[in-house]
Image: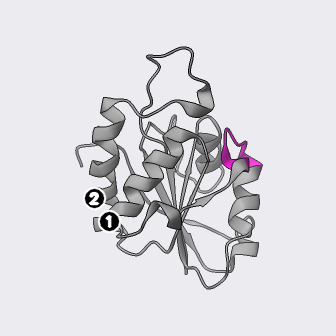
Amino acid sequence: MKTIILIRHAKSSWDDHTVSDFDRPLNERGKHDAPMMAERLLKKQPDIQAFITSPAKRARKTAAVFAKAYGLDKDDIQLKDELYLAPENVFYEVISQVPESVNSIAVFAHNPGITDFVNSLTDVKIDNVPTCGLFAISYNGNWQSFETAPKQFLFFDYPKNEA
């Protein structure tokens, strides 16, 4: 059984308009939500073996907070340039490259691609994956068969969800 947690980066700052989109940092809400959501994920999915992220600052910082909650260092996070503002098909490509020895991954990315991607996976549809939102699925098979394998929805969570 393989498990994938798709995570939209935490809320980023738009305060400094001279900063490029790629280099935007987390804002105060993002700095609050990321550790809270990492703890919630740890309770639901205590074993994540690989953290894969867009190299954009807001995604890297979000991934680092989650990795820390799992006892990992930021150096354990895999940066994938192609995840920066990735369309749906790129997620399939990145996931198909995960080593077979790994059974559970967390992938950090951006909208609109992440919402489009999660909506392609199961019958569960999300209007918009909010910042720091988590969408989890599982399936039987190997990483190379991920795109065509039947997938099972596990959970969807986000900072303002009180459940």
The reply to whether the C-beta atoms of the residues labelled 2 and 1 are less than 8 Å apart is yes
- Specify the farthest residue to the left: 162
Residue carrying label 1: 42
Which residue is found at the position 66% from the left and 82% from the top? Answer: 100
Label 2 sits on residue:
39
Is residue 70 found left or right of 39 in the rendered image? right
Q: Looking at the rendering, which quadrant does residue 26 occupy?
A: top left
Asked if 63 appears above or below 127 in the picture, the reply is below
Of residues 128 and 15, the one drawn nearer to the viewer in this rendering? 15
Residue at screen point 60% across, 44% down:
114
Would residue 126 be seen by someone viewing this image from the given angle? no
- x 59%, y 50%: residue: 118
In the image: residue 91, left or right of residue 78: right
Which three-letter amino acid code belongs to the residue tagged 1?
Leu
On screen, 139 above or below 61?
Answer: below
On whether residue 33 falls in the magenta region, the answer is no
For marks 2 and 1, give the CA distance.
5 Å
Q: Horizontal and vertical percent for residue 73?
A: 43, 65
Tell me the magenta residue range. 82-89
Q: Residue at x 41, y 62 (%)?
A: 67
Question: Which element type, helix, strand or loop, lies under badge 1?
Answer: helix
Residue 76 image position (x, y, % from top left): 51, 67
Density class for disc 2 (Cα within 10 Å; few <14, some 14-19, many ≥20) is: some
Is residue 88 one of those drawn in magenta? yes
Q: Secondary structure at mark 2?
A: helix
Residue 43 % position (x, y): 28, 66
- Going by the numbered disc 2, the residue's amino acid type is Glu
